[in-house]
Every structure is written in C-alpha cells, then in structure tokens.
Image: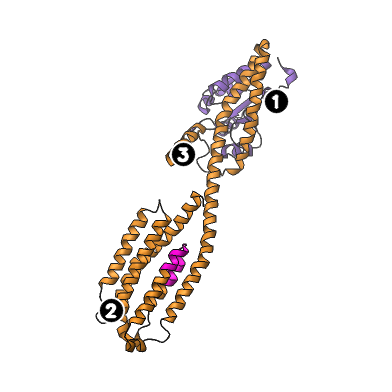
Chain colours: A orange, B purple
C-alpha cells in the first residue's frame, strides 16, 4: 500500500476511534441516569469508563493531524475494554431486577456500533467479540435461579447481535475501501493540480524573458547581418523553448483558476511551492 | 495624431518594452511609446491617445491594474486605434479570459515573433523599413 493510501486508511480508522470515544464520553454517564432505580448501582464504573473515553478523545483530537492505524486500533481496543468492564459491573446490578431487565442491551448496541465505526476487521472482531463474550461469560456465571428469571433467549440473542455486528463490519469495509479510493483520488487530483500550477508558473515566468530574447535576436539580426550564424543558433534554441512551452501548456486543463489568481507573481508562486515542498519533505 | 502609425506598448518588463519598441522602430520606421503601468498611461494620456496601435500586456504585476484595466481606460478616453493584448499566461487564466471576452481585441501569447508583431501593428513583412 502506498504511503498516501496508508495515510487515508489511518485517517478513516482514526475518525472511527474518535467517534467511538466520543460516544463513550456521552453514553456511559447515561447509564447513571437510566439506572437511577436500580438498587446499589455504583456510580463510579460509568464515570470511570467516560473518563477513559475522555482521555482517549483528547489524545485522538490532539493527534488528528498525524493519525496512525496502530494508534487508532489501540484506542479503539482500550475504549472497548473500558466500556466492557463497566458493563460487567453494571449488568451484575441490573440482573437483580430479574425479568424487569432487558439483558445486555448495551452489549448489543456496542457490538453494532463497533461494526459501524471501525474499518479494521481484526480490531472490529476483537471488540465485537469482547462485547459478546463478556455477556456470554457473565450470563454463565449468574446463579441458576437468576438465569431462569431473566428474559428468554439470552445469551443467544446477544450473540446474534454480535453476528450482525460482524456482518456490518465486513460490509462496512467495502464502503471504507470506496471512501479510501475516493479520498486518494481527491489527493491525487489536488497534487496533479498543484504540479500543473507549478509547471504553468514556470512557463509564465519564462515567457517574458523569452519575449525579450526573441525581440533582441530579431533586432540583432537586422543590425548585425554578419552575426547570422550565431543568431541562427539562438533562434533554434528559442524554437526548442517554444516546443517546451507548448508541452507545458497542456497542463492548463488541469488547473481550476480561483479568486486571487488574477494577478499572481509566477516567481513568488514557484518560491512558495519550493518552500512548501522543502518543509513537507 | 502623433507620428503616423505610432505604436503604444504597455508592459511591466523594462527589457521587453525597450527591445520590442526598438525593433518596431527599426523594422517599420514607426515611433513607439513604451509604458510600464496604467498610471504611466494616464500620465501620458495625449501621446497615448494619438497612437494608432496599442499592445497591452495583460498582467502588469501583482496587485497592479491590468492590461484589461488599461483597455477600459483607453476605450473610456475614446482611443481610436487598434488594441491587441499580449500575455504569457494561460488562456483560461481569469484575466486572459476577461481580455478574450472583450472580443474587440485579439489576445497574442508571448513570445511573439517578428511576423506576428508586424501583423499586430498592421505592417506586413514586405513593408519593412
């Protein structure tokens, strides 16, 4: 994969992790609100999960201009781990409600959300697996009497949601691949236009001195017929430069002229381009 | 009308102004007034309006009034001669497009040769001085 393609993948993955962290920051405290009537429900697990989400969000926002796939994967995994840990603790209290509890709703939501947000299949599989496996294990560890009192079908229903999450994840990778190609094409088009602008700036900058050489050669030919041989060489060189000029003119179709381009200084543009390239390298 | 067939050349590059004007004078025997900016053009209004041909460089430098502005001023002053634009920029460049859209003036691309120059000022090659 080219470095530009890799950067595009990293940007998409980073954006997914950033959204997941933001959802954690907003969503985890809602658990406190929803669980107001649940006996002995501790406040700290949702707050701790949200705090982890907030720390990740700050890190992801700070690093958004230099995203990496590894960084995006690590933050997605840590964020999921924080949420799963919170759910294990809060689900234990929710389970006390027996048949009044709709089991593992947040686990199901988490599995579907990961499928939507991450473009990395391996990361998605681990995260969805964590949501589903934690529900399965926790359900298995409930006392038999408690299990019997809960809604029917669990933990199979949670596993079905996890399978749907995996399907969304796999289908989503095609969408992300399309988005990646679109972004890469946009970057390529922008780079091509920049190159075309530089080429045209070279040509524009050269045209006025060429006009001087053209006129001065014609003048010298009139004034100094004896120098015809030497002037012929200059004229042939000019012809070659005209041919180069015609080749550079082919770049005209790649440039979209913008406001402020009306009276630009070609030399200034070339110096600015060179400075930008030097800083970028 | 000052000096029959006097040519006005407006270009921000001093070397182009001097060599092209010198060339016009040498090969056609006509006078040539070389000016660098729209401000110079306005300052020498009477001499400029007496010319029979005006060759206007379109880009007269960053943040400076352009050859298109010079064209508008000449028209406003009822300049009776022929006007031609000269440019080193792309046809799609906003200023060049504006100049081309005026219709009345032809746009030539730098560098122009002697034959094109003679054609612009209405002096076919066989009329060389």
Residue B25: tell me if it is visible: no
How far is the residue under mark 2 from the one under mark 1?
91 Å
Q: Which quarter of the picture shows residue A276? A: top left
The stretch of residues the image draws in magenta is A111-126
Q: Residue at 36%, 82% (x, y): give it.
A: A140
Chain for mark 1?
B
Characterize the magenta stretch by its predominant secondary structure.
helix
Identify residue for label 3.
A277
Relative placement, left or right, of A118 versus A22 is: right
User: Horizontal and vertical percent for residue A77?
Assistant: 38, 64
Q: Are marks 2 and 1 in contact (CB under 8 Å)?
A: no
Chain for mark 2?
A
Q: Is residue A175 above or below residue A99?
A: above
Identify residue for label 2.
A36
Q: Which quarter of the picture shows residue B47? A: top right
Q: Residue at 57%, 27% (x, y): give it.
A: A208
Residue B70: tell me if it is visible: yes
Q: Which of the two marks, 2 or 1, is nearer to us in this view? A: 2
Chain for mark 3?
A
Relative placement, left or right, of A281 versus A79 is: right
Q: Are marks 3 and 2 in contact (CB under 8 Å)?
A: no
Q: Is residue B100 above or below residue A180?
A: above
Identify residue for label 1.
B119
Secondary structure beneath dot 1 equals: helix
Which of B126 and A150 lies nearest the eye of the viewer? A150
User: Horizontal and vertical percent for residue B19?
Assistant: 59, 19
Q: Is residue B79 above or below residue A4?
A: above
Quarter of the figure with the N terminus of chain B: top right
How far is the residue under mark 3 from the one under mark 2?
58 Å
Mark closer to the chain start, 3 or 2: 2
Q: Which quarter of the picture shows residue A209? A: top right
């Amino acid at each position: 994969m080219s470095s530009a393609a890799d950067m595009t993948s990293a940007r998409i993955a980073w954006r997914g992790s950033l959204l997941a962290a933001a959802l954690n920051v907003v969503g985890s405290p809602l658990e406190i609100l929803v669980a107001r009537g649940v006996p002995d429900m501790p406040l700290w697990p949702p707050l701790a999960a949200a705090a982890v989400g907030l720390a990740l969000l700050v890190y992801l926002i700070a690093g958004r201009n230099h995203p990496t796939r590894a960084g995006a994967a690590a933050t997605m995994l840590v964020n999921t781990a924080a949420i799963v840990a919170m759910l294990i603790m809060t689900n234990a209290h929710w389970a006390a409600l027996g048949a009044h509890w709709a089991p593992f709703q947040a686990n199901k939501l988490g599995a579907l959300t990961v499928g939507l947000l991450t473009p990395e299949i391996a990361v998605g599989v681990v995260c969805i697996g964590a949501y589903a496996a934690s529900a399965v294990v926790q359900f298995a560890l409930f006392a038999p009497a408690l299990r019997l009192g809960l809604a029917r079908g669990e933990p199979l229903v949670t596993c079905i949601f996890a399978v749907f999450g995996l399907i969304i994840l796999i289908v989503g990778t095609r969408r992300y691949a399309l988005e990646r190609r679109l972004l890469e094409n946009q970057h390529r088009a922008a780079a091509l236009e920049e190159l075309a602008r530089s080429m045209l700036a070279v040509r524009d900058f050269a045209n006025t001195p060429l006009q001087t050489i053209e006129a001065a050669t014609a003048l010298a030919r009139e004034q100094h017929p004896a120098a015809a041989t030497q002037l012929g060489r200059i004229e042939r060189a000019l012809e070659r430069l005209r041919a180069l000029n015609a080749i550079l003119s082919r770049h005209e179709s790649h440039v979209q002229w913008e406001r402020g381009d009306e009276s630009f200084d070609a030399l200034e543009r070339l110096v600015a381009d060179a400075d930008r390239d030097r800083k970028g390298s | 009308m000052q000096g029959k067939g006097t040519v006005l050349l407006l270009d921000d590059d001093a070397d182009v102004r001097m060599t092209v004007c010198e060339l016009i004078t040498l090969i056609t025997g006509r006078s040539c007034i070389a000016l660098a900016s729209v401000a110079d053009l306005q300052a020498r209004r009477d001499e400029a309006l007496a010319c029979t041909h005006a060759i206007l460089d379109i880009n007269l430098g960053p943040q400076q009034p352009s050859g298109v502005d010079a064209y508008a001023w000449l028209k406003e002053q009822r300049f009776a001669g022929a006007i031609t634009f000269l440019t080193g920029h792309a046809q799609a460049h906003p200023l060049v497009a504006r100049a081309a859209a005026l219709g009345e003036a032809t746009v030539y691309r730098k560098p122009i040769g002697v034959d094109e120059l003679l054609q612009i000022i209405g002096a076919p090659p066989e009329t060389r001085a």
